[in-house]
Amino acid sequence: MRVLGFAAALLLSWGVVGEARATELSPACRTRGQPINESGFITLGGIKQWVTVEGHDCANPVVLIVHGGPGNPNTPFAHALFGEWAKDFTVVQWDQRGSGKTYGANKPAEDEALTLQRLTADGVEMARYATHRFGKRKVIIMGGSWGSALAVNIAMAEPDLFSAYVGTAQLVNYQLDMAASYAKTLGLARAAGDTESIGKLEGLGAPPWTNPRAFGILRRITRKYEALATDAPPKGWFTFGPGYDTPAYEADYTAGEDYSFLNFVGLAGDGMGPKIDLRRLGTAFAMPVYMLQGEADLVTPSEVSKAYFDDLTAPKKVFVPLARTGHDPNQTMIDAQLAALEQVRGEAMAKDRP
């Protein structure tokens, strides 16, 4: 079984992995007490995209998770990460265009580019589908890293679809995040007398970059220093589960990871990532905002996320620093995400009381 790595540093088949057999989901899951555990393709943006759903009770609130990367879907290890959430929530995930099983079902042409606008439209369609399927007026949207930037774009595009936004390792402005990441990491390397890392970072120079390998070089060094200041995730979290532990899926996952990442950085620093600046979308959220930030995060440093958070207006906003946590998920991060979701759930239930 393959362990997750880092690349370059409605048509359904529910219950039958990878085999498209129907053009409609199973009957709408809306009955209180009705469990659901399904995976398959639906049509989003005119192509087949892979979706998984897990929940113990269809009456529970729906959480739409927007994965990071880009190109790193959670679906191969979703149960290990979020299985406990299924008691109180219906957890919906999808492999974004260019990622995982969606990539495998829609191999892009060599010159076919991913765009934030197209992925945002896919996400809005996914959220609208979830509200219809589960009989909800709104769903909770949650994203981390790349997924946090995409999730904000989705939430801002159609705010009436969402009851709350939960962001982790918030990517706010690629240029500001990379400048802070570079400076902090170089400072740590110099303090440690780490001549190898210092040489690599000084060789890159401070961002902005036109070298597509620059982000990956920095990321490998940030992981080295984050590991010294964080608690590691439990063993086995990022091992591909049943239905995903095949050579064919591994090949598609890796190819999609590479394709998406190259579209993120761009061949000359002109990809989706360098254009991200969430303030351009406005700073007024129509829904509560929960932002969870690892104190040792060297990729989306806290000072950039917190400055953005402070500028936001929302019906409610909460910023939660996470000790011993970096950019990647660990138990502290997963527990904090669930705590935020439970708070959203409790507030929603209180509003529904007579």
Image: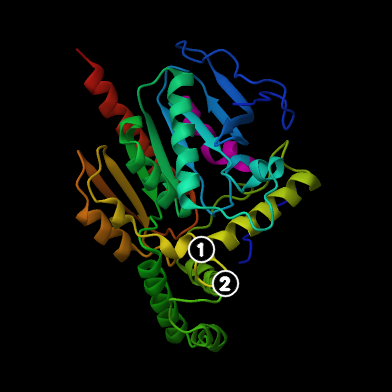
Alpha carbon separation for disc pair 2 and 1? 9 Å
Label 2 sits on residue = 212
* SS category of the residue bearing label 2: loop
| Front-lying residue, 100 or 223 | 100
The answer to whether residue 53 is above or below residue 184 is: above
Quarter of the picture holding the C terminus: top left
**At 33% across and 55% down in the image, what residue appears?**
278
Instruction: Say which label, 2 or 1, has the lower sequence index.
Output: 2
**At 44% across and 28% down in the image, what residue appears?**
128
Q: Please state the horizontal and vertical placement of residue 324, each as a whole percent of the image.
A: 41, 59
Magenta stretch holds residue 354: no
Q: Please state the horizontal and vertical placement of residue 321, each as a whole percent of the image.
A: 32, 55
Asked whether disc 2 touches disc 1, contact meaning CB atoms under 8 Å apart, the reply is: yes
Amino acid at the residue labelled 1? Gly
Task: State which region is magenta.
Answer: 76-87
Magenta stretch holds residue 78: yes
Amino acid at the residue labelled 2? Pro
